[in-house]
Amino acid sequence: MGGRRPPRQVSVEEGQDCMVCHFDAMASPCELLIESDDRSEAARLAEIAADEAWRIEDKFSRYLPGNTVGRINASRGDAVTVDEETASLLDFAQTLHNLSNGRFDITSGVLREVWTFDGGDRLPDPQAVSSVLQRVGWDKVTWQRPVFTLQAGMEIDLGGIGKEYAVDRVAVKLRDAATCSAVVNFGGDLAVTRAPLERRAWRVGIEPVSANERRRDTVLEIAAGALATSGDSRRFLLKAGVRYSHILDPRSGWPVEGAPRSVTVAADTCTQAGMLSTLAMLEGHNAEAFLEGEGVKFWCRR
Amino acid sequence: MTDKTPKSVSATLAAATCSLLGSAPAAPVQAQEDPGWDFNTALLYYGEDNDRVQDLSLNILGKRYFVDDRALTLGLTVDTLTGATPNGAIRQGVPQTFTRPSGSSVYTIPANELPLDDTFKDTRVALTAGWEQPLGRLWKTSVGFSGSFEYDYTHLGLNGGLSRDFNNRNTTVSAGLAIARDEWDPVGGTPIPFSPMLDVGDTGNKTGTETKDVVDAVLGVTQVISRNLLVQLNYSFSNSTGYLTDPYKFLSLVDGATGDTITRVPAPGVEGPSHEFRFESRPDDRTKHSVYTQAKYYMGGKVLDASYRYMTDDWEIDSHTLDLRLRWPIGEQSFVEPHFRFYTQSEADFYTISLVEGIELPAFASSDYRLGNFDAITAGLKYGWTTRGGNEMSVRAELYQQRGSIPGNLLIGNQVGRETYPDLDAIIVQFSYRFSR
C-alpha cells in the first residue's frame, strides 16, 4: 500500500457521458466514473472518495511507521490493542487463512526479503527462504480481539486486502452520499455503487496480460457488484524456461506452480472478488476448476 | 483447500466480508463480457467407405449476450449429402433392377452385391434461434425455434427450458420440452407401407406428403460434488407419432423355402423392378425413454469427461452408449483430447431381412440396418490451440466402425451365408474456429 507518496490532489474532468475523477492512493491510479453532468457534485463525491482512500492508506500502509500496522510491526512481541476497524480486518485475515488452509497469510510479507520479482532470473537460496519462513505463519500470532500479539521479527501486511477493502468502503460512502451511480476503480479493482440509470451497465476493460500480446482487451459490462483482478503481468521471475509467479505459497516460501497470468472475478463486493481471485491464483493449475466450483464469473488468462 | 466443499469458500467469504464492511452488498453482482457476438464455426466432413454416404457440413453458431445474462443464439447449418445407402433389399445371385424413388428411372445392382441406392443426394439448411433469460438470481428460462429444410423433408420445432439453482448453486435442476412437426414430401410421392415397387411411371403405390409429430421432454440434475467433480443425471422422454417409416427403404419378397427373391417381369415396353420388393412399414408411434449420466473430473488442468446413456423404446430397441474424453493441456495455449465412444443396440422387434411370399404379412417390417443389432466404436483425437488473437481453433479426426449381426432365425434358405449385416466404416474430420467480434 503505497511507496513514495504522490501529491494528494483530485482532478475532475468531463468524460464522454459521465464525470471522471482521478487521484492516487495506495500506489494505484484511482478513478471514479460518476453518472452525472454536474461538475461540482462530482468534485464533492471525489473528495469523499479520496478522503476515505487516503484515510485507509494512512492507517494501514506498511510504509508509514507510526500507523496501526507500523505499531503492530514494531511491537517486538508485545500485545497491541487495536481499534474496531483493525480488529475487523484481522478477523477477516484469520477467516481467509482458515479458508485457504494457510495459503492466504498476512504475515507472509517478509518473504519479500528474499524474493524480488523483477522479470529477471535470480532465484533465492533455498536456505535463505527456509530461514525467512521461520518468521511467517498466522498460526504463530495470538489474536484475541481486540488484543493482537505478533512474535518479534514477524510483520503483517494488509496489502492483500487493503485495496479491495478501500474500494468497498468508498463505494458504501458514495452510495450514502449520492443517488447517482458511480464506479470506484482503484487500479483495476472496482465496484459499482448503485445501478446506473442512463445506461444499462458500465463498460470497463480488463487489461491484456502484456502490452506486446496482441490479444484484444476484454470489455465487461457491469451494472452492479464488483470486479477484482489478480495477476503477475509484470511481476515474475524466469529461470530455465520456468516462469515463477509472484504468488508465493507461505507454507513453502516458494511460488505457486501453474498460477494463471491473471484472474478477474466478478462478485457482489470488491473484497469478495479480490479474495476469490487471490485464492484462485494460489490454486495454481487448478485456478479455473476452483472458480468453476465456486460458481462465480471469472476471466482467466494463462 | 481441496478437501473443502466449494460452497464453504464463497459462503464463508460472503459472511466474512459482510462483517468486515459492516453492511450487506448493495445488490447482487451483474457483470458479463461484452464480446459483441461470439461465433463458433465448424466445417465437418463425414465419409463412409465404399462410396456410401459423404456429408460435408458447415455450422455457424452466433451468441450475443446482453446485460442480466440474457442471450440470443442464432445458428445456421448447411449440409450436403451424397453417396449410396443400403436400400433394404437382400443380395441375389443375379443382377437386380430397382425403380428409383422418383419413379422415373431404374438402377441395376450386380449379382451378389449389397443393393445400394445411389440416388442419395441432398442439401439441408437448418436454422436455430434461441433466447435465454434469467428470472431472478436462481431461475433461468429459455425458448427456441428450429427449422430445417431439404427438398423432401421439412422440420419445424419449438422448445422451452427452465432451470433453477439450489444449494448455493451447487445443484441445478432443469426441465425442457420440445415439440416438432416434420413433413415428408419425397420426390415421386410417399410410398404406401407394404405396397410393391412398381414399374417406371406407375405411381399407384404413392401418396402425397406425410407428417410426423415429436414431443421430447427432459428432466435433469447437475450437481457439484467437489471442487474437482461435476456430475449430471438426465431422464428424457420422446414420443413420435405419424409417419415414422423411411420412404426410401423396402424389403425383398422371398420364397419361403429357398429364401431367394421372387422375380417379376416389368410390363412390356417399360422399365421396372426385376424382383418383388415391398416398401417397409413401421409403427406410427414410438416412445423412447433414456437415462443419461455424465461426470466431469478436473485433475490439475486435465479434464476427464465420461458419460453413459441407456435408451429403451417400445420398438424393443435397447441401446447403451459410453463416451470418454480426456482433455490434456500442452503448454499454456493448446491441448489434445482423445475421444472414445462405444455404442451397442439390440434390433427392433419388427426388424427382419425379408418378407415371405404366401404368408400373411406381419403388422410391421423393416430391414433398415440402423434398426438392426449392432455395435459401434468411435475413436479419435482433437487438437486445439489458442491463436495469437485470442481465438480458439481445433482439428478433430475420428474413425467410426459399425459392426452388426443378423439373428440366425431371420435367415431363410440361401440367405444363410449370403446375407450379412452391412458393416460400416467412416471417417470424421472437423475443423472448428471460435472467435468474437
Image (cartoon, coloured by chain):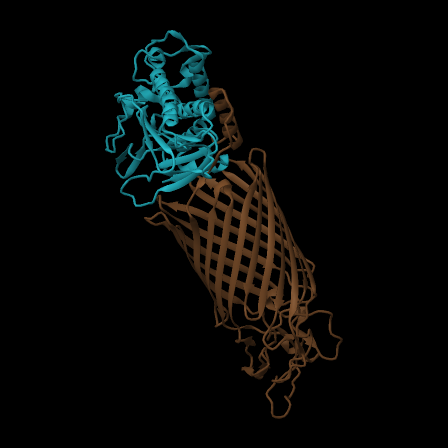
* Quadrant in which the C terminus of chain A is drawn: top left
| A205 relative to A78, above or below | below
Q: Which chain is brown?
A: B
Q: Position of residue B149 (x, y in %)?
A: 55, 65
Q: Quadrant of the N terminus of chain A?
A: top left
Q: Residue A258: in sight, yes or no?
A: no
Q: From the viewer's perspective, is residue B253 above or below residue A289? A: below
Q: Nearer the viewer, residue B200 or A7?
A: A7
For the point 41% across and 14% down, the residue is A141
Image label count: 0
Residue B339 visible? The answer is yes
Q: Quadrant of residue A94?
A: top left
Question: Residue furthest toward the bottom?
Answer: B268
Residue A115 figure quarter: top left
* Vertical position of residue B330 compared to residue B158: above or below: above
Q: Tell me which corner region of the image, top left, top right, bottom left or bottom right, holds residue B201.
A: bottom right
* Figure chain in cyan: A
For the residue pair A163 and B263, the one nearer the viewer reads as A163
Q: Position of residue B109 (x, y in %)?
A: 55, 81
Instruction: Name the spot of residue A286 as percent of width and height, x first.
Output: 43, 36
* Along the viewing direction, whichever of B382 and B144 lies nearer the viewer: B144
In the displayed structure image, the side of residue B80 where residue B260 appears, left or right: right
Query: In the picture shown, does residue B346 fall above or below A197?
Result: below
Query: What residue is rendered at 55% in x and 63% in y?
Result: B148
Q: Left or right of A58: which side holds A273?
A: right
User: In the displayed image of the protein, which residue is found farthest to the top?
Assistant: A78
